[in-house]
Image (cartoon, grey):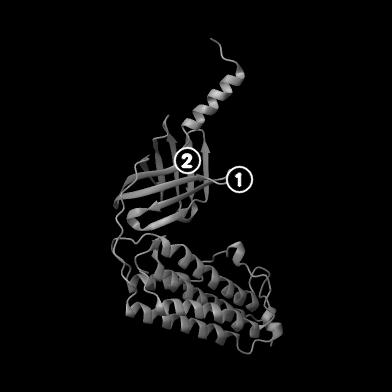
Amino acid sequence: MKLSTPWLAILATAAALAADPTGDWYATMTTPGGALRVALHLTRQADGALKATLDSIDQGAMGLAASAAKIDGSAVTVEFQMIKASLKASANEGATELTGEWSQGGAMLPVKFTREKFEIKPAAAVPISAEDRDFILSHLERSRREFYKSLEGVTAAQWKFKPAPDRWSIAECAEHLVTTEDALFGMITNQLLKAPIRDGQRKTRADDQKVEARILDRSQKAKAPEMLIPSGKFTGPETIAPAFNPKRDRTIEFLRTSQEDLRGRVANNMDAYQYFILLSTHTLRHTAQLNEVKTDPSYPK
């Protein structure tokens, strides 16, 4: 029997639906560093856009958002720009297996996902230590002091002076720090601290120092996300403290009283405690940038 075009279209649609690769996928990848359990989550948004996230379970890195994701029939392509990795795979006829290659750092690893979920036993929580608490509280107070000191005596002309069209003024550096304090605190407390506790080796002070050094290294330029780009809403140095202080005070109060396991929750190979180190060191980074503006030959006297 010869099928008409409408019936062929209906059958094609049904076949595509039957092999729909969206949903949750689980795999154990064999890497040079050992076996790693990963979970891939593919979901359709209300507008039809595809969202993909990855959990690297044994590394404690949860909810890594894909920079691009595409489903073409049974073929799945996902890219993770932040970790310079990508996945190219295809679902079988019943969409019970997803087979392909994981590419990262020049290495190509075969990977086979199934729908069988890993049993993940929660690790025991370990509250922040007294040593870690004292260190981060001191760090946050020091970075605030240095930030405010850099604003002392800045005139209206100096406030808006830009060393070059593509470089920020003192006003822009200061506004960026006010805005970023909120963004980072929200990301840590609303997202990272809700992730499962990682069961494994914990970060040390030596690891924290590497985070600080990386953030303070201004030879590595980074473009701020759109939402953190200054808009010129602060009219002078005297307007910064009333805006920044409540945000920094909230961060300090949280860390002064928190019993959260900050070392046990990890994203992108940094634990929650190190994200607070990043928050404070980010203040020092842009304070250095702010002070650098003052050294420009054309800086108003």
Q: Earlier in the sequence, mark 2 or mark 1?
A: 2
The local secondary structure at tag 1 comes to loop
Specify the quadrant that holds the C terminus.
bottom right
Image point (44%, 55%), residue name: 63
How packed mark 2 is, by other alpha carbons closer than 10 Å (few <14, some 14-19, many 20 or more), is many
Name the side, left or right, on which 105 lies relative to 298: left
Residue type (three-letter) at the residue carrying disc 2: Thr
Q: Residue 220: which disc?
A: none
Instruction: Say if 250 sits above or below 66 in the image.
Output: below
Is residue 295 visible in this depiction of the protein? no
Distance in Å between CA atoms under marks 2 and 1: 15 Å
View extreme (right): residue: 157
Corner quadrant of residue 2 = top right
Between residue 205 and residue 16, name the one nearer to us: 16
**Which x, y percent locates residue 124?**
29, 64
Instruction: Say if 251 sits above or below 13 in the image.
Output: below
Q: Which residue is mark 1?
A: 47
View extreme (top): residue: 1
**Which x, y percent locates residue 241?**
59, 83
Q: Which residue is mark 2?
A: 22
The local secondary structure at tag 2 comes to loop
Corner quadrant of residue 177 = bottom right
